[in-house]
Image (cartoon, rainbow, N blue to C red):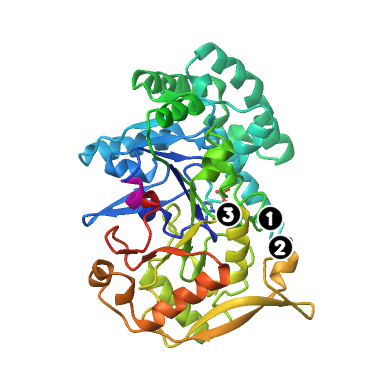
Amino acid sequence: MTLTIVGSQLGDEGKGALVDRWGGDADVVVRYQGGDNAGHTVVEGGAEYKLSLVPSGAVRGTVGVLGNGCVVNPKTLFTEIDDLRERGLDPDVRVARRAHVITPYHRALDGIEEEVKADDDAGDEVGTTGRGIGPTYEDKAGRRGIRIADLLDPDVLREKLEYVVPQKRALVEDVYGLDLDDDDRADAFDVDALHEEFAAIGERLADEGMTVNCSDFLYRRREAGDEIVFEGAQGTHIDVDHGNYPFVTSSNPTAGAAAVGSGVGVTTVGDGEVVGIVKAYLSRVGEGPLPTELDGDADEEALADEIREKGGEFGTVTGRPRRIGWLDLPMLRHSARVSGFTGVAVNHVDVLAGLDELKVCTGYELDGETIDTVPTTTERWERCEPVYETLDTWEPFDSAAVAEAGFDALPEAAREYLEFVADEIDTPIYAVGVGPDREETVELVNPFDE
Ligand code: IMP
């Protein structure tokens, strides 16, 4: 059996808690896209683990795999592994040899391109995490990337760096007009320095036996009867194909990528469960439209502040305050269709408790028409006026007691809210998050019991 976990909004839906919870019933947790732009917070027995690359399941001793669809910054990977070891854990992490490597020049280029876009005042900067994600995927598609396997062979590594690094220097100097001799990012474009650093990384990966042929590894694990969780990072609406282009990340967080990004067949993913993770309201970090954003007047801003504080809505990776909006059902309909959700988990239901008002966007008005899903262009989405349904609010409740007692113990208005959402997107609710700790989840269906 496989379980694929997908972010159904703009990332930060609380996927980590569910991966961690259900990953405990699995043997292997696989990330299939993205890199250290992801921020997963896992709370276990009061201890908080902030992970951006190591799969969340590793906190509970499950084998973690970074699939070929990931872009891997090995420095982040080693820092996280070392940190977990220092805290007494023994994470077993494998990395696909076909995964692409984020190098210092990718990170530098990410920053430089954003600076250039910000300077031209056209408002087209994406607000990336600055982790080099886009430039690394560009090189992958451009067939000039460095893969994990290349780090294991110093001669191959040198050959590749000697081909690509001068191109990057020229891009920075001739296109972006920077003088690298007078820039503290110069080392990022120095072949010898890069070779020394990354050959040593290759040695450590080899010494620790961390690299795998991902497809083969997962095939053998499944043959041996293992259960697998595919852990999506980011969310559907920042998917490079299905999201709000160009305000997107450069990979596919949607479920189809679980197959491509790990080397298992689509039939394997499709035979399993695909659970969309939903936040009970919306948050967005970075630029781009957000039709239900609470920023219209001082009252709305105060409400956004309240939700932001209660929900701890500050970026795990960058610390940026997240923009806040009402739950948007057109977005969820799109997500459910693109990934074929078999169920959803709705998180942060506790954060909405005690509000004076509660709205849900059921559709949009656009050019005199009412539509029920997200338009294909950013320009049209930006012009959408949300159509709202106002629902009853509920009072704060004891999350631990409710999680223990089950769905019926939730306040009636919260149950109505959840049933309304499930009905509108025609997908059953598998779990409800009522607090940050893994235990603070009301489970209706455990996908591994199906
Ligand atoms: P990048 O992935 O760093 O290239 O950033 C592209 C866009 O995706 C920016 O708007 C980021 O804020 C957003 N983004 C990337 N990773 C995450 C995430 O894990 N959660 C939420 N937003 C993200």
Q: Position of residue 114 (x, y in %)?
A: 62, 50
Q: CA distance from mark 3 to mark 1?
A: 21 Å
Q: Is mark 2 in CB contact (under 8 Å) with mark 3?
A: no
Query: Does residue 107 appear anywhere in the picture?
Result: no
Vertical order, 425 against 189 (above or below): below
Q: Position of residue 208 (x, y in %)?
A: 34, 22
Return the residue at label 2. Answer: 378
Vertical order, 343 against 153 (above or below): below
Q: CA distance from mark 2 to mark 1?
A: 7 Å
Return the residue at label 1. Answer: 245
Q: Earlier in the sequence, mark 2 or mark 1?
A: 1
What residue is at 70 percent from the left and 40 percent from the top? 177
Q: Hey, which quadrant is residue 176 in on the image?
A: top right
Vertical order, 172 against 290 (above or below): above
Secondary structure beneath dot 3 equals loop
Q: Hey, which quadrant is residue 350 in on the image?
A: bottom left
Which circle, 2 or 3, is nearer the viewer? 3
Secondary structure beneath dot 2 equals helix
What residue is at 42 percent from the left and 34 percent from the top? 65
Query: Magenta span covers which residues?
Result: 20-24
Q: Which numbered marker is on residue 133?
A: none
Given the image, on which type of amino acid does mark 1 rest? Tyr
Which circle, 3 or 1, is nearer the viewer? 3
Q: Position of residue 146 (x, y in %)?
A: 57, 26
Q: Position of residue 309 (x, y in %)?
A: 38, 72
Classified by dominant secondary structure, the portion drawn in magenta counts as: helix
Given the image, on which type of amino acid does mark 3 rest? Gly
In the displayed orientation, state which residue is furthest to the top.
155
Return the residue at label 3. Answer: 340
Circle 1 Cα neighbour tier, 10 Å, few/some/many (<14 / 14–19 / ≥20): some
